[in-house]
Image (cartoon, helix red, strand yellow):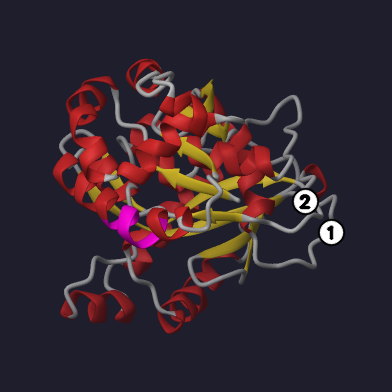
Amino acid sequence: MHIVLPGALPGPDAARALLSHLEKTAPTFVGWLAAGSARTQSVDPAKSGCTAIEQWQLEKAGFTPDANQNLSAGLGPLWSENHKIDPQEPVWLAELVHMAPTQSSAALLTSDDLNITREQSVALFDSAHSLFEGTGFQLHPDGVARWRVIPPPGFTFNSSSPSLVSTASVNDWWPQDASIRPWRRLFNEIQMLWFDSPVNVSRHRQGERPINGLWLFGGARPSQLRMSPTTDDTLSHDALLGPFLAQDWGAWLATLSQLETQVFKPMARHGQAPVLVLTGRNSIVTLTPRPFARLSKWMGRGRNSWSKWWLSQN
């Protein structure tokens, strides 16, 4: 069994401050840390175009980028809900997002933060569809939060995932290639079209943020994924991710305590420790249970050895 915990690796300063609270907050979790053999992997979001957890998902799916692609390209075929796409056809997705102006740029909120209904998605799709006519881009349904975009021949750029863009200024991730200018023009037209759309008027009345943009990413082919045919025994719990991104470490500890009660302790009662996959901003740590780990614990070995990589993995 694998348990994946995005946001479970705080940065160095926070990790140091949280260390003394962990055993009291989540003793089962700490026991797994102490009993595991850690493999630490450094990641570079600026190069990959995706977050650490997205990189782990792509690696698990066996994605191999082409020479001119970054890892983020694989998120197109990985996340598409249309399973009838030609395996050799590039898959670009456009995610429904909220763009909020800042003093120097804009901030992005992903669809996960917007509570988008199917009815809203359909209405916005119908309104935007006509804008694509004659542009060389085609728009097709895919899911509630993301639509498929078929670009004109020769269109390509190294995209960044919406989740990664949401962690910084949008300008940090807007590519400046001449090839993407036609999409940027279309993006601006969509923003103007949706400014006072009935969907967003209704969302404003309900206290919801407007859906005012489409973030384009992906571009890889389904054939570049080599997913294992074996039964997936992976459970992902992303409750730590929100407090992690907000750097709200009190809420992070409270969430870890809930996971201890609701997830870790019940699993520990079955006796076998899981493989843990922990991610932060720039690292992935995979913890595999060591043979005879319980015996070494009682012999006093390795009880606190996990704290070395916990404090240094960033």
Tell me if residue 208 is in the magenta stretch: no
Q: Amino acid at mark 2?
A: Pro
Residue stretch rendered in magenta on the structure = 258-263
Q: Residue at point 22% right, 22% down?
A: 16
In the depicted structure, whether residue 127 falls above or below residue 280: below
Nearer to us of marks 2 and 1 is: 2
Q: Residue at point 75% right, 66% down?
A: 83
| Residue at the spot of label 1 | 86
Q: Residues within 10 Å of mark 2 (few under 14, many from 20)?
A: many
Give whichever of 304, 298 is nearer the camera: 298
Q: Is residue 177 visible?
A: no
In the depicted structure, whether residue 146 falls above or below residue 241: below
Give whichever of 311, 26 is nearer the camera: 26
| Residue at the spot of label 2 | 222
Spatial CA span between label 2 and label 1: 8 Å
x and y percent of residue 269 in the render?
A: 46, 57
Give whichever of 33, 230 is nearer the camera: 33
Q: Main secondary structure of the magenta part?
A: helix
* Furthest-bottom residue in this view: 119
Q: Earlier in the sequence, mark 2 or mark 1?
A: 1
Q: Residues within 10 Å of mark 1 (few under 14, many from 20)?
A: few
Q: Residue at point 19% right, 74% down?
A: 204
x and y percent of residue 88 in the render?
A: 85, 50
x and y percent of residue 77 in the render?
A: 69, 53
x and y percent of residue 312 in the render?
A: 36, 15
Q: Residue at point 56% right, 35% down?
A: 289
Local SS, label 1: loop
